[in-house]
């Protein structure tokens, strides 16, 4: 087959425009990572030694660890090993390293005290702060927060939490009203950022226990704990995007029209060419619906952030106990695991 | 044949040039936010914008040929300049984190993270999250207060969103910035560290 000269020009130009992707192939090599003490989290860092809390990491597992690591062609990778109460350790490893042992040094607090292992406090009464949750109805011509449905969702979340923790903790909801307003607002300001910025997986491995950032936030946690006689505060935030029937019908109509147009043009072209078959495109509508929920547990007395999780679900019917219980079961699964570990 | 070849080459060159262009997103002038503050601090503060903040932009690739640049640093400075007077008697621009004669404290904002979502298909929600850090310095240049806040914004115009996508990107960012700024003002207004007597104690050398 001979290529036309125009096609060659087009291809050359396209390549010069798009550029040839230079993808360095990564190869896997086995590596054994040991830390002293063990039980530390191993993360792979970008190819730089200088790291900060903002540096993106890829979690590899807990020590002792033996697995295949991706090494960029001919390059080294950096490992970071973190454990609560210890200064994080880093190591540069090469494909031929095979095994690496990282000794962790004890971390000290501001007054030279040792930092204890990650643990949940003894919780009898769990204070559930009024959730921040919006149901957003997305219509054909715009979107708005549905206040009634948002209130139903918040109510459903509280009931789901009460059902989930029944028999383990006494669950006491706290409303953002009366004397508690200032404290709840202050708490939320710190909580939103902690939920956004704190890595839920690394949290229990951080050298120092993360705490609410501001004095006002910590004071609010203490104040609420004291007033409502609880040991821990549970905060939930999130949103649910739900498309209205009009939006759904509009999309189906639009995509059906797209499919029909594609079919008819394909059919017409086939007829004009005298072909016996033709290709057309079936457009499938995308529904941008779903629920995002973030949760955080805070120690009332120290302001320590004990646990964080976040997850995405489909549209939840917050009046359906089964739906809400399933969400709670999945959202709090890590917390449940931690409770089981501590009760052994 | 030559004409076709020329058209192909010219079209390719034009596309290549377009690909390198980042469109500057136009954002609305910041508004004074409605924040209930029981009592303003009765002293002036300085607003210090670092070089990094002044030059802060965030670019997102919206298609293989387009990218959009958010002028976030510029917008943040305007937002703080407009809204800090809700909490303090007056606000002056300063060029150092240590207050001079015209300010008791200096407020230094910085952008920790900005994460917009440019949806595809275009009728999905346009969202943005911004994380601001605000440091406040006393007369000695010591940091007396620090607060990190997160603001979220979401918007869309339903099925017709794609026709005003740039406006929606700006709207989502502005909603997130306003949400964060509101929290900053509430936090500053309620901070014990900023009460006049604390500030005066810190200012005495």
Image (cartoon, coloured by chain):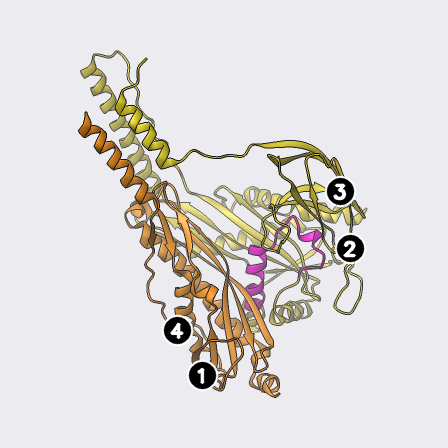
CB within 8 Å, label 2 to label 1: no
Distance Cα–Cα, label 4 vs label 3: 52 Å
Secondary structure found at label 3: loop
Chain A on-screen colour: yellow
Chain designation of label 1:
B
Circles 2, 4 touching at the beta carbon (< 8 Å): no
Q: The orange chain is which one?
A: B
Q: Name the residue under label 1.
A: B89
**Above/below status of A170 relative to A220:** above
Report the residue marked by disc 3.
A63
Asked if marks 2 and 1 fall on the same chain, the answer is: no
**Image vertical order of residue A89 relative to residue A182, above or below:** above
User: Magenta stretch mostly in which secondary structure?
Assistant: helix
**Number of other residues with Cα within 10 Å of mark 2, as a class: few under 14, some 14 to 19, many 20 or more:** some
Query: Which region of the structure is painted magenta?
Result: A184-210
Instruction: Classify residue A327 by image quadrant.
Output: top right
Q: Where residue A117 is drawn, which disc sits there?
A: 2
Q: Residue A56's x, y, as percent?
A: 58, 49
Q: Check chain identity for marks 1 and 4: say if they share one.
A: yes
Residue at the image point whose x is 41% and y is 42% from the top: A288
Q: Distance between the residues labelled 3 and 1?
A: 55 Å
- Choose the circle earlier in sequence order: 1 or 4: 4
Q: Tell me which residue sits at (21%, 12%) in the image.
A: A274
């Amino acid at each position: 087959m001979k290529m036309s000269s125009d096609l060659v020009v087009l291809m050359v130009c396209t390549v010069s425009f798009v550029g040839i992707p230079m993808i360095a192939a990564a190869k896997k090599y086995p590596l054994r990572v040991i830390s002293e003490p063990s039980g530390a989290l191993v993360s792979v860092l970008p190819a730089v030694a200088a790291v900060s809390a903002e540096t993106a990491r890829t979690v590899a597992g807990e020590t002792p660890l033996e697995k295949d690591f991706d090494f960029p062609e001919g390059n080294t990778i950096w490992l970071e090993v973190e454990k609560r109460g210890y200064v994080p350790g880093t190591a540069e490893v090469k494909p031929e390293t095979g095994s690496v042992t990282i000794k962790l040094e004890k971390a000290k607090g501001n007054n030279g005290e040792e930092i204890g292992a990650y643990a949940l406090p003894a919780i009898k009464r769990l204070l559930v702060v009024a959730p921040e949750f919006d149901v957003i109805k997305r219509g054909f011509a715009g979107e708005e927060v549905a206040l009634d449905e948002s209130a139903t969702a918040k109510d459903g979340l509280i009931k789901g939490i009460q059902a989930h923790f029944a028999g383990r903790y006494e669950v006491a909801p706290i409303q953002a009203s009366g004397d508690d307003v200032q404290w709840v607002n202050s708490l939320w300001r710190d909580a939103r950022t902690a939920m956004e910025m704190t890595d839920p997986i690394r949290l229990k491995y951080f050298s120092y226990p993360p705490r609410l950032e501001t004095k006002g936030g910590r004071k609010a946690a203490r104040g609420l704990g004291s007033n409502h006689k609880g040991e821990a505060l549970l905060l939930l935030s999130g949103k649910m995007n739900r498309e209205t029937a009009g939006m759904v019908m509009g999309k189906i109509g639009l995509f059906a029209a797209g499919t029909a147009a594609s079919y008819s043009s394909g059919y017409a072209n086939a007829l004009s060419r005298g072909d016996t078959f033709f290709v057309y495109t079936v457009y499938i509508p995308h529904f941008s619906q779903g629920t995002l929920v973030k949760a955080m547990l805070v120690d009332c007395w120290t302001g320590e952030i004990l646990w964080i999780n976040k997850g995405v679900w489909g549209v939840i019917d917050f009046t359906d106990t089964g739906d809400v219980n399933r969400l709670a079961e999945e959202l709090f699964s890590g917390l449940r695991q931690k409770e089981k570990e501590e009760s052994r | 044949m030559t004409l076709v070849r020329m058209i192909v080459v010219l079209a390719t060159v034009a596309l290549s040039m377009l690909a390198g262009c980042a469109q500057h997103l136009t954002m609305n002038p910041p508004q004074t936010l409605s924040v209930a503050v029981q009592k303003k601090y009765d002293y002036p503060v300085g607003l210090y914008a670092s070089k990094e903040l002044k030059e802060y932009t965030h670019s997102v690739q919206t298609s293989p040929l387009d990218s959009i640049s958010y002028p976030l640093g510029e917008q943040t400075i305007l937002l703080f300049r407009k809204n800090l007077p809700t909490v303090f008697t007056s606000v002056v621009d300063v060029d150092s984190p240590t207050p001079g004669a015209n300010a008791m404290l200096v407020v230094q904002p910085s952008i920790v993270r900005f994460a917009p979502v440019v949806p595809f298909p275009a009728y999905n929600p346009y969202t943005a999250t911004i994380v601001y850090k605000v440091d406040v310095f006393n007369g000695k240049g010591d940091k007396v207060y620090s607060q990190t806040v997160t603001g979220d914004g979401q918007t869309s115009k339903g099925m017709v969103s794609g026709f005003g996508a740039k406006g929606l990107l700006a709207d989502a960012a502005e909603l997130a910035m306003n949400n964060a700024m509101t929290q900053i003002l509430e936090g500053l207004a309620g901070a014990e560290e900023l009460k006049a007597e604390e500030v005066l104690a810190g200012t005495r050398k």
